[in-house]
Image: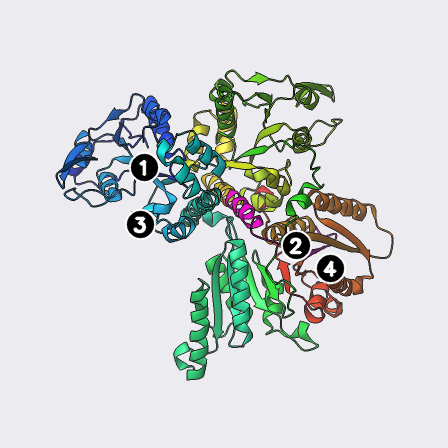
Amino acid sequence: MTKNPEHPDEKELEENHSVKRKGKLKIIVGAAPGSGKTYKLLKEANDLLRKGTDIVIGFVEVHHRPETVEQMGDLEIIPRKNVLYQDRTFEEMDVDAIIERQPAAVVVDELAHTNLEGSRFSKRYMDVDYILEQGIDVLTTVNVQHLEGTYREAEKITGVRVREIVPQSFIESADEIEVVDVPPETLRQRMRDGNIFHAGTIHQALDHFFRKENLSALRELTLRIVADTVDTQFQKSFERRSIPGPVGAKEIILVCTSFLARSAILIRKGYRMARRMKADLFILTILEMPENDLSDKSKDRINKLRSLGDFCHAKYLVEQRGDRALGKVVMDVTGQLGVTQIVVGQTHSPRYWAFWNSNLVRYLLLNMKYADLHIMGWKDGSRPYSLTDTDLRNRHSGRSPDPNTLRGRLTIYVGSAPGVGKTYKMLQDANDRLSKGTDVVIGFIETHGRKGTANQIGRLETIPQRVVHYNGRRYGELDVAQITQRHPQMVLIDELAHTNVPGSEREKRFQDILYILEQGIDVVTAVNIQHLESLRDTVEHITGIKVKERIPDWFMDQAEEIKLIDVTPEMLQLRLAQGKVYSKDKIEHAMNHFFRLGNLSVLRELALFEVADNVDQSLERQRIIGDPPRILTCVNYRPHSEKLIRRGWRIADRYHADLYVLTVVSDGPLCERERRDLETMKKLSEQLQATFLRKEAPENRVGELIAKTAGELHAEQIVVGQPLPAQHFFDKFRRNPVIYVLMHAEFVNLHVVANSRGEYHEENG
């Protein structure tokens, strides 16, 4: 946001009839008062000032918070103007004085503020827009409840009416938008410490607006609205065009309907599915003729479907078939909308279904790319989509907790990429705890040669690393024995996804952390989003990079607190260019590969949605009762199988379901490659806390065994891979397992995962 001194000033441009540069807008969003928006705003402003940017304070509200006041530092303050209103004098931001001063950038707090009568504009966001028009950059803040797209939901959550609203169009016009993520308990502690409101209002706030469930819901809302904005901006970007298929973390569901009575059932199922996945929902009806030429009865049926779509917050689409196959129409719409899930109903087809070219499901199975296919069965599940699970926490941990053991608390700092500041923030917070009397030590910290990070170590005690010799080299590893012997209240352990040197007691660092937690020691750790096991295929598809070190997703559920460190891609690239992420010899390669703007945008979106989903899952577990449903994922020896297991886990996690992985082997002996692949799938299943099932059957009876196993488990979803196209004519006569299940099995939902889903760029393969 620095103004280039080599450019002519605005007056000179106007004299030359040139177009005036509009200022850049950066918005920092928080979930509630006290989240640290203004603190972060001023810290960033001071960083810009030190780098030579002419930046001033136009309006800042410190709310008598000493730490915030301290952050004002040496920043120049534009005096406020006095406004007389109803015989009282109030202070407002002086827009004219800011423009007359003509700084490169200005700090403007409280974006949703309503100005007093007599001001140039009625709202502060209008002031900001006017300042931007004068070529001045603006850094500003807003809480999520003041956004046009979320204020109604915020009112439902808190029961507090929102009067000051910022239009969604203004938010989407921002050049950068960033979230300050603070877990609810941290916010509540700040309230108890008197760092947010005056002492007389603390108890009332804790019992009302600042209730933990309120703050959790507002936090999820904040993460999702910023993620949606990031996604919208990225989808319009140039880099988006270079990545095939849907890109991003957000699911988009397309329900395909006709005039049948079952259409209403299908739409409701799609709606429940969209709510569970936090997805956008579209409903498609394909017509043989223009809608205006339909009979009154048909028009009435369409209007009823359209009304049901409105009720389900879905967009209803009508497409004319023309000379296209039904499946081609669906695929065309899927490509236009970036659909990730296609939902259709189970059909009762004739015996020679596989040769019926006009069959919609057959066409989609043969031609779908990137989008998964959900075939909704008409069997009623015992708990269709109620999907409850009280034992999820125990299941994910892999063991039942000993009630007599005091387990340590786990805190995880999550980032979208190296350099976002996870370790920096982790150390900064640890020093705050140390100053308040917490016995906190460093178990393992990797500064990567960053001076700013190293300076944050401060007075923290460091446990020496354990030296390990392997292949003639020395390695420093986490010394678990020394940590447990020292037994601090809290230990910092960086690089969560790290794989230990061969010969260590445990293979992965997350396993070391689980052991330390069992000793009653709190652990604070950090990880980047690309290291989550279930996101491996998505990250490869986006970045072209295979992530070798990964952690199982269930480990995230062990955390009492997850803190997202959000940094815009532009800021990350700037840090990289300044040598604050990697050494100079690695900067150019990183900028042209992993640190491309498109990569960073989508990784950031993944991080935002992942933390939002974690918040949602935590809220959901507090409300649900009953036994978990079961999802059956079917795999074989194809390379697609590992992707299927990861996909199955993400589905099970969203639905709070138990995951079963079934592989069917032939009744003959396995070759070495088959045994190796089978062991890999078993290991991945166990790592994701899924139950691995191995059964034998002849090749032409696999479909029957899948149907039988699903019935025995009372599975509510069967997850399979897209059938491979027939290579020879006689292959069409063989019993394809997916086709068999589709035609003969009773099921609630058959989920077919596209072979191309999760594949990465060929040029980076």
Between the C-alphas of marks 2 and 3, the distance is 41 Å
Find residue 538 and report its horizontal and vertical position in percent: 57, 46
Q: Is residue 562 visible?
A: yes
Compared with residue 58, is residue 213 higher up or lower down, i.e. above or below? below
Considering the image in quadrants, where does the C terminus appear? top right
Report the quarter where the N terminus lies: top left
Q: Position of residue 495 (x, y in %)?
A: 59, 29
Earlier residue among tags 1 and 2? 1
Question: Residue drawn 62% across and 31% down?
Answer: 408
| Mark 1 or 3, nearer chain start | 1
Q: Does residue 616 show up magenta in the picture? A: yes
Residue tagged 3: 167
Answer with mark 2 or mark 3, whichever residue precedes in sequence. 3
Residue 146 lies left or right of residue 495; in this view the side is left
Pointer 4 with pointer 3, Cβ within 8 A: no
Q: Work out how far the residue at label 4 is from the one at label 2, CA to CA, in angstroms.
A: 12 Å
What residue is shown with label 2? 628
Q: Amino acid at mark 3?
A: Pro
At numbered mark 4, what does the secondary structure look like: helix, strand or loop? helix
Of badges 4 and 1, nearer the viewer stands 4
Q: Which residue is at a point 72% across and 61% down the rendered structure image?
A: 710
Residue under circle 1?
140
* Image location of residue 751, percent across then percent down: 63, 60
